[in-house]
Structures are given as structure tokens and as C-alpha cells.
Image (cartoon, rainbow, N blue to C red):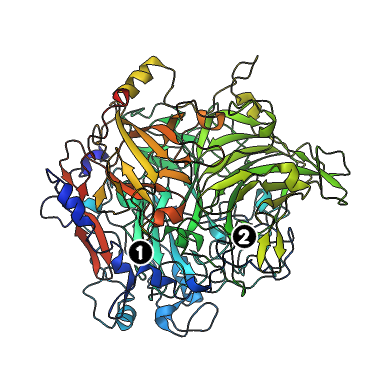
Amino acid sequence: MAAGLDYFGNPPATDPSAGTEQPADPTQALQQLLDQPEPNEGAMEIPGGYMHKQELSAENFIQRDELSSFNYPTNGYPSPLFGALPFTQKMLMFEEFGPEKLDPTVQAGTLPFPLPKAGAAPFQDSEVARSAPDTAEMDAFLKQAGISPFPTREANTSIGNPWKSEIEQYLGRFLTNPPGEGRPQGEGWAHQRWNEFYPQVFFKTVQAPSRPNGGIRDSLQMHKYQVGEFGPGGLYHNTAGLPGLDGTTKGIQIKIHPNMPVQEKHSIWTFDGTLPPKLLMARHGQPMLMRHYNALPIDPSANRGFGLHTISTHEHNGHSPAESDGFANAFFFPGQFYDYRWPLQLAGYDSINTSATDPRASFPCADGEQLWVNDANPGLKNCVNGKINIRGDWRETVGTHWFHDHMIDFTAQNVYKGNAVMMNYYSGLDRGNEAFNDGVNLRFPSGSALPWGNRDYDVNLVIGDKAWDKTGQLWFNPFNKDGFIGDQLLTNWQYKPVLDVRARKYRFRILNGSVSRYLALALVAEVKGSSGEMKGPAGSGVSYNRVPFHLISNDGNVLEHAVPFDGSMDLDGNGNKAEHKGQLPTQAIAERYDIVVDFSKFAPGTKLFLVNTMEHQTGIIAKRKVPLADILSETYKAVLKNGTQWDKGDPTVGKALQLTVQAYSGTDLSMNPAEYEPAKPGKAAGKKMIPLWLDRSNPADQAKLANARFRVFEFGRSSGTDVNPWTVKADGGISYHANPRRISGAPELANGPTDAGFSGDGTLEVWRIKSGGGWDHPVHIHFEEGIILSRDGAPPPEWEKWSRKDVYRVGGGPESSGVLDVALHFREFAGTYVEHCHNTQHEDNAMLVRWDIERPGQFVVMPTPLPTWDGVEYAPSVGIPTFRTGSGTFGGQ
């Protein structure tokens, strides 16, 4: 079988990535870590030495000594609008990367990765080290066929960094064989189970400074601008509502609004260096490779005061092996690439449904397609009735993901600057074709022109706060370590856009893409006159009704039951049903909520609005939910005071996105979410969508939990310093600030790769996440989805009760709590992962811990990669005293 072709042991002693023994008494070794150089020192090399983190902010428009004391944006000045008015631009839909078949027989193009060149503003610089490649050369490079060099299992150290000469000229020294691939070398960072999960498709992208979109991905869109709402006559055929953009993105510049300036090269760094924001369409069971090139400036200070030119990409929250998870200290440099291979398999691949006989675990496909499946009779399988069965636990199916930078100490700045895209997984259960009715497909709103992956009525929304300086260029305050709060709320990188929708059901995949801001979104419909349930502004002649919807997915995980936000249920047990009508719960940074909204009852021309109700004053904690009625009547409304600061409220509280209903002549074939609702008083529960793998009330599951290893992680400021204020304490021990050389937990896999026929549970653990009430922490655990067992000892609310999660809100603030218990499985892959606060200013200022998944019987600890321009070095790692044992068992707590 394919599994037998892959090595799954620890690196041999002669390998540069070989592990070392854990000291019998790690006390001294842990203390010595405090005296080690910063792990990202190599990323900040300048001629003659190294910069420090704070020095990288030298070009910030508002210097430390000039910072205001105003709250919005954090210590900055109000963002000028340049005459832009709300709801005067068409919302950009996401642009697909468009993966292609990975075929070694395809003759790859011969154009090399283009060099940075001196050139004219706004897209290049007069100094090569501060500049970027020519945009036409970049497009030509990305458009060429194939992939060269061809991907390899271990990091390719035989090729050099093509920017070597330019880097040497900047540094003033010679480089010693700087590698072209930035992945750490050796067996420890080789692609695990490479042959078994050999990538079948690939795509190339480049992290690059702002530049115009050349339309190079037009032909790679699944719809090809020919069918459905993306085809001629459809709502989304013209990509930006401007002349010349029918069926193309060619010519789109990075502008927050047409009235605002073009963002220049040092302000925004995005995937491809362009807008619209990108979307990866992936399928469960089809392994994929992303070749991520780095075309950011060689000079680390060429950043307009925030962001770092080294990056590490995390697919949040893929079931990915550690070498492709985006470990914070596995970053790579300008001129290099990193091959991320994502198996995209269902968790439980080695232990559940290993014969691939359950049709609910499946890959959506079109006639004629084939897929390698390692079932009882491994080999290529043909598409039959629209799907191919795959191994694994169908209850671990995922949907709405995203991937983003995870550079240690600079995640907030790099993500804010543009290093973030969304990712949709498709499966037999969630195939993106509402007309396909096989008893497995849940038929979520999507469309039906394509066999799978229709986006006509399935819309990705990334909502996040931003700020810009007086010249209109993106601005960020890196100095405030409590968190950054912007004063403008953008949707898909746009200031208050308009989205046209048909009078039918839609699915919205909503990501909170902020750095520190929590959201609480409501949906309302405008009513002419005063007949609505909530008043509009005095003299406006309008009122508003709240619009009900169903939550179908939380953190990319389809729920067991569709939760109604229509006022019919007391969703959190506080005795108030009405508060949940048309209003989502608190949404922390990185949380995703998928909702289904039915627009069929609205007449064409009706305006609806997504409204943010969550007020902040600082980045430490969300203050409160402002009553929706006060926002709509403008009783609560921030105003500019003396033109220099915001007064009387948070300026992002209010309308963020307008939805305008258009006539629909088709037939809505999508599911009715009301049929899947949980039990209500006097009414039995409806059908299940994707059930949880654990029943909290089942005695057998309770017995498993009682015997599970138990770990405690406490997020706070205990023993914090001015330099590193935030800390994490593991298992009641010492509070530490982040250090990737320190291991705070190490679950062990129950087994290695298995043939079809094996059954079992894998490794089950319970992690307790704690924090005080004086701050908010959205804690993200990489790799596995967890089930919340309790909040402060009580059952979780309905929107969490039926969900698997990967972001867990603890601390103060609305709808949070001090203690969560989370059940987690660990299966399939080993290596080095992290857990951290996803208020990324907290993460970047020490609130991150490393934990490892160890192979069965492993006794050595894995070393820590330390990347430099000359290649990756390794440093010994050390575990805290309880890193393998935890705090005992959950039942014995």
C-alpha cells in the first residue's frame, strides 16, 4: 500500500533535524532559554548587525512620541474619507486561486522568479532593496505552465535563492549557499506520508507589495465568468461595477474606495499583491500543494512602519502535518518559496471508516474524474454518481477556513497588512451544488451550474477594522501591546460596499479578520415609513425590522443542528429569547460564522444592512453590545470632534454592508434550515446535519473523557514584562512568555499510519483554557477541532453546543467565560504546533505556546528551526516538567 512507501520515524542521529533527549531536570535548561538570542533575529538582519523589533517601526507615519491618546484608532488620528460616502461602491467577490493538476510530464515554463528592480512609485522604489519585481514580469512568471523545480519530499537545498546578488549588495556580505526553498531541511521537516498523500493539484502565489491586478486568474475561475451569476447578465459578471471589468479582474487597483488613493507598495502586502481578496477552492480527499513565493522587500525596514518581510503561512485550522502548518518559527525570506502540502484528509483517517465505505465521507466530483483512495483496495477510483468515497470520520468534515501569516512576533502586522485569504472545503456533504440530491449532500445555498463549488448564492465575507493616515495609506499602531482597534470597518477590504442579492436563500461565510476587535453582527431590513419594529433617525422616513436567519456552521464546522436566530429560542439560557432575533453572538478574531438568510420575502429594491453592535474602547476587552435600536435611530453615533478625534462612541458600531434585493426568476433548490433545528419546548429536534463525534451525556463517552489526559493553560499577564506583557501558564507551573524552543505539551499518537481495516479512537485529551475577566482572549489551538464540554462548569450555548471549534473565547467581555473545558483528538500527523491568543497583538507580545505531537514511543524532543538568509539552523528544544504528563487525567482533576 501507499502507506508502506513512507518513512514515519524520528530523524536519524546524523540528520540536521534530529531530536535530543529531554533533560531529567529541565529547570536549568528552561532558565537558559531566557538568555538565548531572539528566535527571529535572522529575519531582521541589516548591514553590520540586526534590528530590534521596535526599530522596525521607524517609518511609521505616527511615531511613538507623536501618538495621540485617542481610542479610535488606537492612539491614532481619524481616518480621512476623501469624500467617500457609505454604500457607493460594489462589493468585490473573492477571486479563486484556481488549482491545476500536478503533472510531472508538463513542460514547466523557464522564466525565473523575477528580481526586484528599482522603479517608479507607487509600485516600486528607487532602491532595489526596498523595491519589488516589475508587475508585468511577475504576471508572466505566475502565468507560465507547470512548476519548477518540481516539489520534493524533503526541502530542496540544491537550488539557490535567485535574489542572492541583490541580498548580498544590501547586507554588504557574501551569503553561503542561500537556499531557494525556505522549508527547514532534513527528515524532521520532510512532508509526512508524502507518497500516500501525494499532491494531485497545485497552485502558485506570491506575497507581494500592492500592484494592479493583471487578470491572470480569469481563466482559472471555476465559473470562468460564463455561467450562473458570474456569467453574462449575472449579478457578479462585472467584478467591481466599473466599465471594462465585465468577466475580468484586470485593472483593479488596491483602493479602499474609488475616492481614496491607491495603496502603495509598502502599505499593503497581499497574495499575488492584488485585490480582489483570494479564495482557495479545495476538496476533502484531494491533496494539494501551495508554492508560496516571497517577493517582499529585502530591507526589513521598507514597511511603512509595520510588518516584516519574512512570512510563515498557517492554514487555519487544517488537519495538516506540522511542516505545512505554518509554525511561527518556520518562516522564509524574500526570494525564497515554501512548498506547503495539505493532505486535506478527514481526521480519523487512520482509525475510522478506513475502508472508505461510508458515502458521507466523500469527495465531490464530475463525470470522468479520478482520485487515488487508499481504501481496502487502494488505487484510482472513478467518479460515480457525483462522488468518490474517502477514508476518515465524516463527522470531521470542515468547510469555511482561511490561511494567513504566522510569523513569530509579527502575525498581527503581517495579517493586517494583507496576508490573509479564505478557503472553502467541499465534500459530499457540502458540495456547493444545491440541486444535487443524493441523500448525502446537505444542499446549502450555492447554485447548480457547476457539478460542485458554485458561488452564485454562497458568499465569502471578511470583515475587519482598519485605519489609514492623512495621506490615505494603511496605518497600524505596533506600539500598543494591549491590542489595535481601527476606526473603520471594512468588508472584503472595502469601505461600506453594496452587494446585490437575489430574492432567494443565500449562505454567507463570515470571517472576523480583525487584529483585536470583536464583532457582534445583526441583520436588518429597511422599511419605508414608521411601521418597522425599530425607528430610523429622526426625519429619515425609514424604520427597520430585524431579519431572522439560521447559523449552520461555526469555525468552519457544520453544526449538528441549524440554530435559529429568529427569537424562537433562548439560545444561551439567560431567559431572553428576543435578543437573538436577527443578531449573531459575539464573534472573536478568526471565528467564522456561516449563516443562511432567506431574501425571498423581500421586494426587489429592498435594502438590508449588516450592522456591527460591539463597542470597544481598547484592544484589551470588548466593552458591550450596543442596543440595536440605539444604533439604528442614531441615538448612539460616533461623531468627529474638532476634526481630530472620535467622540460619543465607537465609529465602527453601525452599518457595515448594504445588501440590495434583486428579482429572482429561478428556482431555489437549497435546503430549508428549519428542518434541522434543535429541540424546542413542545417540539422534537429536527434532522441532524453533521453530528458531533462526542455526546456529552453518553456514559461511555463520559468514561473515555474521565480517562483522558488533562492539561491546563492559563492566559494572562502573570510575570509579564514591558517587553513581553502577555504570558501563558501550563499545568499550574511557571508563567512563560513565548519561546518556540520551549515545549508546553506533547500528546502522543496512539498509532502510526495504518492499513484499511484498523479501528480505534486515536489519542483523546481534555484541555482546560482559563483567563481572568479583565481582558478578552480568543484562544486558537492548531491542528484539531475541539468540542467544548462546558463554560464555567455550565453547558455551552446553542451555537457552541452543536459545534466543533478551533477558536475558544475566554476572559471577560460579552458571551465569554473564565474557564472552558475542551475535548480534542490527536491523529495522523506528528510534529510541532502552537496554541495562542488570536488577538494577534497579544500573540505577538508573548501569548503563544508551542506544543508537539509525538510519534508512538518517541523519547527525544524535536529541535527548533532558526531561519537565516544563509539557511535554517536548528537549536535544542526543552519541555516543561509536565509537557508529556499534563496534570493527570480529566476524571482525577
Residue 25 location, x and y as percent? 13, 44
Residue 199 in sight here:
no
Q: Is residue 714 left or right of residue 859?
A: right
Specify the quadrant of the image occupied by residue 242: bottom right
Dot 1 amino acid type: Phe
* Figure check: 115 above or below 344: below
| Of the pair 641 and 697, the residue shown nearer to us | 641
Specify the quadrant of the image occupied by residue 582: top right
* Figure check: 396 above or below 146: above
Q: Secondary structure under badge 1?
A: strand
The residue carrying mark 1 is 337
| Of the pair 173 and 605, the residue shown nearer to us | 173
Dot 2 amino acid type: Asp
| Of the pair 37 and 169, the residue shown nearer to us | 37
Crowding at dot 2, Cα within 10 Å, few <14 / some 14-19 / many 20+, comes out as: many
- Residue depth check, mark 2 versus mark 1: number of the one nearer the observer: 2
Residue at 57%, 22% in the rendered image: 687
Residue at 54%, 81% in the rendered image: 121
The residue carrying mark 2 is 487
